[in-house]
Amino acid sequence: MRIRIVAALPRAGFMAIGLSFVAAPSMAQPGGDARETLAPLTIEDSALVPAIAGETEVSNRLNLAPKELPATVETLSSETMQRRGLGTFTEAARTLPGVTGGNIPGSPASLSMRGFPRGNVNYLFDGMRAADSELVIRDFDTFNFERIEILKGPASVLHGDGGLAGTVNLVTKKPSLEGNSAEGLASVGRFNTLRAGIGGNRVLSDRVAVRADLSHRRSDGFIDDNDSRTTQLTTGVLFEATDRLSLSASYDYFRDNYAATYYGAPLVARSAARDPSNIVSAPGDLVLDKAERDTNYNPRNALMESDSHWLRTRLAYTLSDQWEFINELSYYSADRNWVETDSYTFNPATGLLDRSTGRIAHDQDFVSERAYTHFDGELAGHRNRFTLGGEYKHSNFATPRRFGSATSVTVANPDRGRVPDDTPANFSTRVNYDSQVDTVGVFAENALNLTDDFIVVAGARYEHIDLDRRIDDLVANTRTRFGRSFDPVSWRVGAVYELSASDQVYAQFNHAVSPVGSLLLSNTARAEFDLSEGDAIEIGMRNRFWDDRATLTTSLYQIKQNDILTQDPANPQQTRQGGSLQSRGVELDLGLALTERWQVDANLAVLDAEYATLVDRSGRNLSGNTPVNVPERVANLSSYYTLAQLPFTLGADAQHAGDFYTDQANTIRVDGHTVFGAWVSMPLNMAGAEGTLTLRGRNLTDEFYGDWSGYSSSQIYIGAPRRAELAWTGAF
């Protein structure tokens, strides 16, 4: 791939940056949709305008416009996700600059960005976050969401501990007083994949509106016996009680069920493979066997299922022309269940795969209360926006965990057996965990316009976190209780300078905190550790040029996390804090209207991520190694063209991810890959509904590639093979 950077001096006398990608097979489907309006087009104009005209919930509570933010925020609208065929959260997120991800059954829809592996991203729903939010996230269907927002870099000031790499906010479709509407979706595809959705908004009076959206997805999947079912219901009611008082409430239900969950393909000896591939470099000449691309090694009765309920309310009261009060209350409850064999290790002595087995359940609930005031007025003759608030969160989490050994199986045609019943004879480890986390936080933010073109933004947050944990070992017949308190302080400062109406430069510095592991899953060994701390610096530029037909966002960043867990070099069996992870990189996001009928979007992320300090249990110095599941090159390209004489739109996309490692020692490397797709769409109105019919092909070259790695470094998730789908979307 060659990259050509072009600098130009438009009429306003400022510098704009143009980017063209040459030899683009290594590029793929683009990301951010939050751009300024381009010149009027005759095709799907809504895809080129910003997903939102005002503030983003994930990035600030100061009601700053996107161009006033001293940070990189990517947004995908519902319309964009439908047009690009992005049916799941993971598919959608991976089109954004520098974002990669995978569906590890224990943590579906885990994302990696800016050089930090999974566990370093926070997840929000309508701006509300749970403690250890990675436990909450699922690979949701995108139909129920108005947009997906991703704030790059740390956001502890806004949302509390964690999220050094970034924060994702899933915004559900909301009721509106602007009028009635109804939307629908139906699609069929390979592997008996069916997807359907219906929803709409209803105005009951000039002050009350309601909305409901229901979606369902089922698929046999390309892995043997890996049937999946997901159902989502999102609802909302809006009551504009007075001109000053607005009340809203939402209730969401999410269910997913996966039979014989896929935990990746195991690496096996080349001599044991019927069709060995060369996409993995590993010690002992271990390979991925292409002949076992669709083989499942999980027992026949294995499953993963989740049911969750989420109730959220919001009150907004305008106190005066300058002051507003907001109160947000949220309650979440979920039950999750795993019956599984999640580890398959090739045994060279027997030629078999040795397996472990387990039964795990989650019973989780939390309540969150947040209240804050917002001021928008003047300070010493300058516009000033200010927010002051407090937050309380209480989480309960119970998880019985059973682990044991399962029978070994052959690589080909395995007799998968069944996960045994939960008895002491079948599971040698039988432990029950109960956790409570209480968090009290206060926060403040301020945005001051020093001039009409220059804004300085600053914020700080203090939290008091109490952890109470109980562990009942049913085998040893012991009970252990421990607790820990933390008092972290986070802060950030940034600035935006508007060079012209079309161009801004921005910079920010963040100081953030993050647990060294899951607070809700803490053990006695980790209870003694403090929170890790991270610092990040970012500079960027947002440009519109070529008569507003092109937009470009460029960002450069550096993040360093200190006090991660490492081993003591003098005693490698002793775990201590003192490790560090750092990354630096550049991200570019380009939108280009080449003609009135031809749109091109592209993004590129290049980074250098490494452990600055890390020692493993063997005493090896891993400093300089790359984190797990972090490709250092990620690119996306998407383009579509509407024919002048025929009612057809033709589109194509490509997605590239570079090499990545599956272990911290960097001994197992998975080759990078490029996947291509194409589609053709046409207007199709049915039963009074105006809609679009789309035929879409994915992975057109039927590429065999490693997509992600899971809990075991020797198990790699294989990307889905070539497939096609036919979909209709429309409005009633």
Image (cartoon, helix red, strand yellow):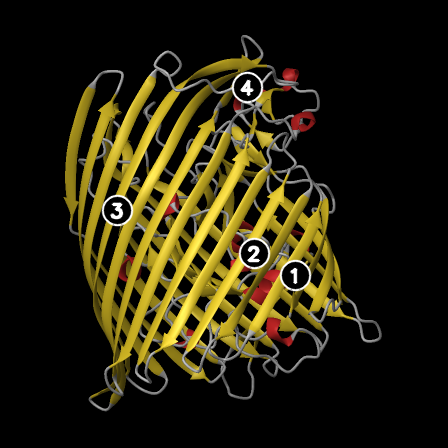
In screen coordinates, is 59 left or right of 503?
Answer: left
- Which tag, 1 or 3, sits closer to the chain's start? 3
Q: Nearer the viewer, residue 571 or 2?
A: 571
Where residue 203 sits in the image (x, y, percent)? 49, 76
| Helix, strand or loop status at disc 2 | loop
Where residue 612 sits in the image (x, y, percent)? 34, 42
> Is the C-beta separation of discs 4 and 2 under 8 Å?
no
Q: Nearer the viewer, residue 21 or 450?
A: 450
Q: Which mark is residue 638?
A: 1
How packed mark 3 is, by other alpha carbons closer than 10 Å (few <14, some 14-19, many 20 or more), is many
Amino acid type shown at disc 1: Ser
Point out the frontmost of discs 1 and 3. Answer: 3
In the picture of the structure, the residue carrying the numbered disc 2 is 95
Amino acid type shown at disc 3: Ser
Point out the frontmost of discs 4 and 3. Answer: 3
- Which tag, 4 or 2, sits closer to the chain's start? 2
Residue 149 visible in this rendered orientation of the protein: no
In the picture of the structure, the residue carrying the numbered disc 4 is 284
Please determine whether, in this image, residue 633 is positioned above or below residue 508.
above
> Is the C-beta separation of discs 1 and 4 under 8 Å?
no
Amino acid type shown at disc 2: Thr
Q: Nearer the viewer, residue 606 or 49?
A: 49
- Which tag, 4 or 3, sits closer to the chain's start? 4
Point out the frontmost of discs 1 and 4. Answer: 1
> Is the C-beta separation of discs 2 and 1 under 8 Å?
yes
Q: Which mark is residue 395?
A: 3
Amino acid type shown at disc 4: Gly
| Helix, strand or loop status at disc 4 | helix
Point out the frontmost of discs 4 and 2. Answer: 2
| Helix, strand or loop status at disc 1 | strand
